[in-house]
Amino acid sequence: MGSSVSIEPVPERLRVLGLLDLGLLWGNLSVSLLVIVAGALLVPALSLKTALLAIVIGAVAGNLLLGLAGLIGADARVPAMVLLRAPLGTRGSYLPTTLNVLQCLGWAVFELIIIATAAAALSDEVLGFGARWLWTIVFGAVAIVLALLGPIGFVRRYVRRFAGWVVLASLVYLTWWTLSGADLDALWSRPGEGGFPSFWHGVDLVIASVVSWTPLAADYTRFSRDRRSAFLGTGVGYLVPTIWMFGLGAILLLDRGLSDPAGIPAAVAAAGLASVLALFALTVDETDEAFANVYSGAVSLQNFLPDVPQRLLIAAVALVATIGALAIDLGSYQTFLFLLGSFFVPLFGVLLADWLVAGARYARAEIFDGPGVRPGMILAWLAGFALYQWLAPVGPSWWLDAVEPLDPAPFDFTASLPSFALAFGLAALASYAARRGRTASVPA
């Protein structure tokens, strides 16, 4: 039950995670201080009721895609980046693998920043010292230990026995604390201030935060007992806490008058002993996300380096993430999240289209014995990415400066859904044409 499973399809004896297991896993991954921070990014530009509507729309759309990604992973039983060999080709999968490794490292860095910030706020409140650097190192080491358990050990030994129930109790208290001190009527009637993000940019932010998990989903659902458990456990398990945590973030920012979303942990820590305990439980649970990004970063690297021990890759990813968390602040988080979404939304459209054209089932040969590169599928992916950036350019300032000469469209609608639809449609045509061509070339 450790982490040493290869890139080959998971054997039947290890397909042991059921609906409850996967629901608890994805529910715990969705409960995150980082998601609270993301929810705070929606306001005060949007009113609370408008922000909540954007949250619900984005969460439903994103989790439908995430559930489907989990289902495909349970069908193929291989890691997510290895799975992309089927639609993109073996060498074609290396580009998204590179992006996903960078994504996993980036998320791990941001998770460790949030964990260390919360832990420093707690220790400063209780013990009189912060020492964020120390907590960064401590929780970087914890992430290594959890990643070495692998998905089965992590769910069975950690989430089911301890983390899931502690986090649920802490969330109930944190929700009560947030709502009991808030003037909900005033918050509900308060208008938005306008500016960025707009409503549809807010929807995209929520979709991006969910869809950023689609390139990781198969790393865990390959251990699922069946496709139904993978779809429901992943999609529904992640959906409810997503809406919950995003909503809490928006309310906390508006009600507590915080000027910086990253200040939320300190505000909670200063609210009394019970809030300190609740924040401590959430801080401990935040290691779930650090575990997932360290583990999936290592598993993704195995698509390049199948002969390198996974334990060594786990240690390397965790070390790089810890160093990054010591050196980086939270300022670029929003642009980072949007840019990731513009890559991975159309990428999943390509995967889903090819899988459906293949009969909603991948044979082993389609993953491991396919062509080196499938240019048509890669072009479909890049076309979806280009449409996303044309409709709603997002990313760091250097990226926005680079795409500005392309005269972006004046478009106030979600860029995620048109981007997904274009990539899906082009990939379906390319996949169908390729399969017809292979069939025609076989002698009678």
Image (cartoon, grey):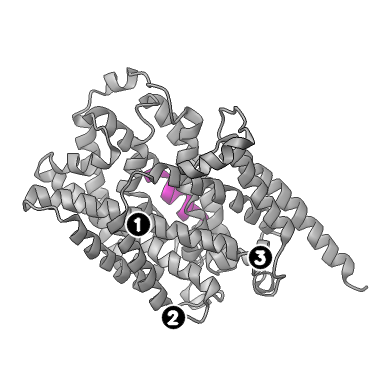
Q: Position of residue 145 (x, y in %)?
A: 29, 71
Q: Position of residue 434 (x, y in %)?
A: 79, 61
Magenta range is 231-241
> In the rendered structure, are the residues bearing label 3 and label 2 in contact, judged by CB atoms less than 8 Å apart?
no
Crowding at mark 1 (Cα within 10 Å: few <14, some 14-19, many 20+): many
* Mark whose residue sits in front, 1 or 3: 1
Q: Amino acid at mark 2?
A: Pro
Query: In this picture, is 125 found above or below 374?
Result: above
Q: Amino acid at mark 1?
A: Val
Please give the residue where the numbered disc 3 appears in the rendered image: 86
Q: Is residue 298 left or right of residue 68?
A: left
How far apart are the alpha carbons under marks 2 and 1?
23 Å
Q: Nearer the viewer, residue 133 or 271?
A: 133
Magenta stretch, main secondary structure, is helix
Look at the image and tell me in which quarter the C terminus lies. bottom right
The disc at residue 109 is: 1
Crowding at mark 2 (Cα within 10 Å: few <14, some 14-19, many 20+): some
